[in-house]
């Protein structure tokens, strides 16, 4: 079967299972509304690479069955939980071209407040104490409520991710081993999020970046493969030699799309620059930049209201310093490393071929 057809078929299969699993019936209208929003958010978009990796790794050792189709949702729910929280922490309003969970609930609380900007359009009202108090109160309410709802949704999704594993129908001892790994993945994922936050505020080297993405993207590729192998009764440590370099290639390419990508990415291509994200692109450019170029980057990076001209100036520097070219080559180098590692992993030929093609796909995609 053609790789892209197979990828699409598996994606559809996963999404149908997600829709069924999250079709929860709740008596409380408040809970029902929240779960419906969670379901909508998870199904809103995405490539479903983590559950697909889990399915294909399992099928590489034994026949695919209904149990793995339930268990594979666990990693997708953890991924979705991390994205909801990440969007709230970064105050992002778009993902996959649609509103983030954070933005949806900010809108909901704003609509419920019956707040009007009309009176602030009359000159001096902007600087009067009462007007300033109103605006600050509204901003705090929006921020507090939307972040709280995002945190709750993220926590609920993690709980549901464990439910997927525990109810998939595997042997109890095998399930327990899988759950231990699953919890370890979540702990390290939170550590990666912390590293990502602090990297925005300091100078970083390439190894800092690689350590951080190993604890975010890397874990979300490696642990689903590890768990799948355990569920299939074939604990294979060599899987990490594929998953981690493949994830590095994926994330470096993702960062390139985050700065140079088009509409297909579903999020603004200036957001990483305006947030001051220390991507490998930025780290390499700052290292190679002239003093003048570095000054331009220092002004624009982390500037929430950076102009289009300032953002374009940074993009130009990323090209002129060869940072873009370096990252493209680095991403490809990591995925080639992952492909070579497959020679040491005892998977069936069909699944091995799929993983070879997947490694190419993650650095060739436009979304």
Image (spheres, helix red, strand yellow):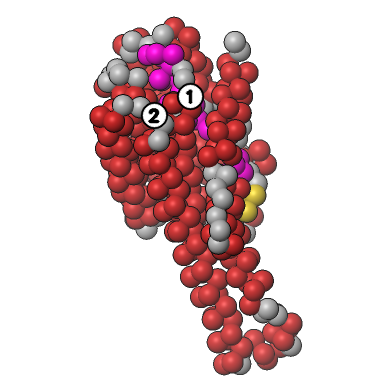
Circles 2, 1 touching at the beta carbon (< 8 Å): yes
The residue drawn where x is 68% and y is 78% is 114
Q: CA distance from mark 2 to mark 1?
A: 9 Å
| Residue density around tag 1, few if under 14, some if 14–19, many if 20 or more, within 10 Å | few
Q: Nearer the viewer, residue 220 or 288?
A: 220
Residue 29 sits in which quadrant? bottom right
Q: Is residue 347 left or right of residue 111?
A: left
Taking the magenta stretch, the answer to whether it contains residue 51 is yes
Residue sticking out furthest to the top: 349
* Magenta stretch, residue numbers: 43-63
The percent coordinates of residue 121 (x first, y second) are 73, 83
Residue of label 1: 66
Q: Quadrant of the C terminus?
A: top right
The residue drawn where x is 39% and y is 29% is 169
Q: Quadrant of the N terminus?
A: top right
Taking the magenta stretch, the answer to whether it contains residue 307 is no
Residue of label 2: 169
The percent coordinates of residue 245 (x first, y second) are 37, 26
The percent coordinates of residue 313 (x first, y second) are 58, 50
The residue drawn where x is 31% and y is 26% is 171
């Amino acid at each position: 079967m053609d790789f892209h057809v197979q990828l699409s078929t598996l994606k559809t299969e996963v999404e149908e299972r997600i829709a069924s699993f999250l079709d929860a019936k709740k008596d409380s209208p408040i809970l029902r509304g929240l779960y419906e929003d969670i379901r909508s958010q998870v199904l809103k978009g995405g490539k479903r690479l983590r559950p697909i990796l889990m399915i294909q790794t399992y099928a590489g050792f034994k026949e695919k069955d209904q149990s793995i189709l339930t268990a594979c949702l666990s990693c997708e729910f953890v991924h979705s939980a991390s994205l909801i929280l990440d969007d709230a922490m970064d105050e992002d309003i778009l993902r996959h071209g649609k509103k983030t969970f954070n933005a949806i609930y900010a809108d909901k609380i704003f609509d419920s407040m019956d707040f009007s900007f009309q009176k602030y359009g009359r000159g001096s009202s902007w600087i009067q104490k009462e007007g300033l108090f109103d605006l600050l109160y509204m901003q705090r309410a929006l921020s507090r409520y939307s972040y709280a709802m995002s945190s709750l949704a993220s926590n609920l999704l993690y709980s549901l991710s464990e439910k997927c594993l525990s109810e998939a129908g595997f042997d109890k001892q095998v399930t327990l081993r899988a759950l231990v790994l699953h919890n370890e993945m979540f702990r390290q994922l939170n550590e990666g999020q912390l590293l990502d936050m602090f990297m925005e505020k300091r100078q970083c080297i390439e190894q800092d970046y690689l350590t951080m993405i190993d604890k975010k993207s890397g874990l979300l590729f490696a642990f689903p493969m590890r768990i799948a192998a355990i569920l299939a009764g074939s604990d294979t440590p060599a899987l990490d030699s594929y998953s981690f370099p493949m994830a590095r290639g994926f994330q470096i390419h993702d960062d390139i799309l985050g700065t140079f990508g088009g509409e297909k990415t579903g999020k603004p291509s200036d957001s990483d620059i305006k947030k001051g994200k220390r991507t490998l692109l930025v780290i390499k450019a700052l290292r190679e930049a002239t003093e003048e170029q570095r000054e331009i980057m220092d002004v624009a990076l982390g500037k929430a209201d950076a102009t289009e001209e300032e953002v374009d100036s940074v993009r130009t520097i990323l090209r002129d310093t060869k940072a873009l070219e370096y990252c493209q080559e680095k991403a490809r180098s990591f995925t080639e490393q992952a492909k070579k590692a497959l020679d040491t992993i005892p998977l069936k030929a069909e699944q091995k071929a799929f993983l070879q093609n997947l490694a190419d796909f993650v650095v060739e995609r436009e979304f």
